[in-house]
Image: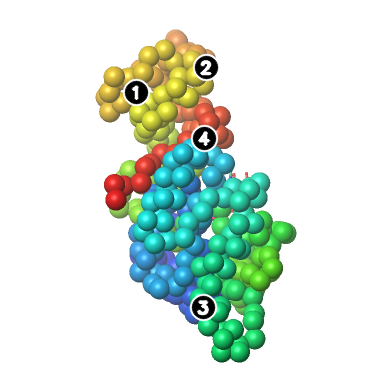
Amino acid sequence: MTIQWFPGHMTKARRQIQDKLKLIDVAIELLDARVPLSSRNPMIDDILQAKPRLIVLNKADLADPRATDRWISFFSARGHACMAVDSSSGTGVSGILSRVQDLLRDQLARRAAKGVKPRAVRGLIVGIPNVGKSTLINRLAGRSIAATGDRPGITKGQQWIKAGPGLELLDTPGILWPKFEDQEVGYRLATVGTIREEILNVEDIAFFALRILSDRYWEALAARFGLEEAPDDPDDTGEIVSLMEEIGRTRGALRSGGLVDLEKVSGIVLRELRAGKLGRLTLEEPPAQ
Ligand code: G4P
C-alpha cells in the first residue's frame, strides 16, 4: 500500500492511534529488522506515551541475524521489550504472547488482586506501511483478516480478533509515517522496498544500496554478481558506477552499442537484494549508546 503523507494525514493518523490506545492494554510496535530505525516513526514515544509496548523486529528472515541481536540489545538497553519474528513463515510469532504477558504481569496481578474477572489482553499493532502489519495480524489470527479500515473512506466498527490464548487484537492496525525529513531514511526504506520506486529514482536507490553493500557485505555482493575488486572507498561515486557497469556486463544488461543499461542493472540489484538472494542483510547499525 502506498500512502501520500501530508501534515493533515499525519495528524489524523496520530489521532486515530491515540483513540485506539484507550481501548488497549499493549501496543505492538512493528519495525523492519533490516532497517529498524529507518522504519520507526519519529514521534512514536510521544504517540504511545506510557502504554506498555513490545517492539517486534519483523522480516527477520531477511535480516543479518547478528545485527538483529545487536538491535534487540539496543532496544532492551533502552527499557523496551524487543524480539524478532518472521511473520511470513510464522517463525517466532508464537513468542509474542508470552512476551506480552511478561510485560503486563504486574498489571494483570493487580487486576486479579482486586478480584476483577480475568479477560484477554488487548493489543494494537502499529507501524509504517509495508512493515508487515497485516501479515502479522493474519498470522496471529490464523486466518486472513480483510483490513477494510485501511482504505480511506471505508469505516467500520472496531473488531477484536482472537490472536491466541488470552490475546485479542484490534483488526485494523495503526498506520504510522516514517521520518521523511531524512533523505538517508528514504533511501534505506526504498532499498528494502518499503517505499515504492515511483517516489525515488531507481538508479539512485541502487547506487545507495551498492554503496552500503560494498561497505558492509562486500563478500556477498561479490559472490552474487561475480565482482572482482572491492571499492577502496565506497563513498567514491566513480567506484560505485564502475561496480554497476561490472554487474551490467556480467548480467548482460547492455544497450545497443554495448553500453551498460544502468536502469536495468539497478532493477536487477534491487530485486535480488529484496528477495534475499544476496543473503540476510541489515542496512543500519544501532547508534552508539
Ligand atoms: P502492512 O500491513 O504493514 O502494510 O504490510 P503487509 O502485511 O502487507 O506486508 C508487506 C509485504 O511484506 C508483503 O509482501 C508481505 O508478504 C511481506 N512480509 C511481511 N512480513 C514478512 C516477513 O516477516 N518476512 C518476509 N520475508 N516478508 C514479509 P508483498 O510483496 O507486498 O506481498 P506478497 O508478495 O506477500 O503478496
Q: Amino acid at mark 1?
A: Ile
Q: Which residue is mark 4?
A: 280
Residue found at x 40% / y 73%: 50
Q: Amino acid at mark 3?
A: Gln
Tag 2 and tag 4, C-beta contact below 8 Å: no
Q: Is residue 188 left or right of residue 226?
A: left
Q: Is residue 52 left or right of residue 234?
A: right
Residue found at x 63% / y 69%: 167
Determine which quarter of the picture holds residue 205: top left
Residue found at x 48% / y 24%: 220
Instruction: Give the spatial CA distance, label 1 vs label 2.
Output: 16 Å
Mark 3 or mark 2, which is nearer to you? 3
Q: Which residue is mark 1?
A: 240
Describe the element under mark 1 as helix, strand or loop. helix
Tag 1 and tag 3, C-beta contact below 8 Å: no
Residue 44 x/y as whole percent? 39, 64
Mark 1 and mark 3 lie on one chain; the one further toward the N terminus is 3
Mark 1 and mark 4 lie on one chain; the one further toward the N terminus is 1
Residue 115 x/y as whole percent? 61, 89
Q: Which residue is mark 3?
A: 107
Q: Would residue 197 be seen by someone viewing this image from the given angle?
A: no
Describe the element under mark 2 as helix, strand or loop. helix
Local crowd size for mark 4, using a 10 Å CA cut-off: few (<14), some (14–19), many (≥20)? many
Residue 70 x/y as whole percent? 41, 45
Mark 1 and mark 2 lie on one chain; the one further toward the N terminus is 1
User: How many labels were placed on the picture?
Assistant: 4
Q: Is residue 242 left or right of residue 219?
A: left
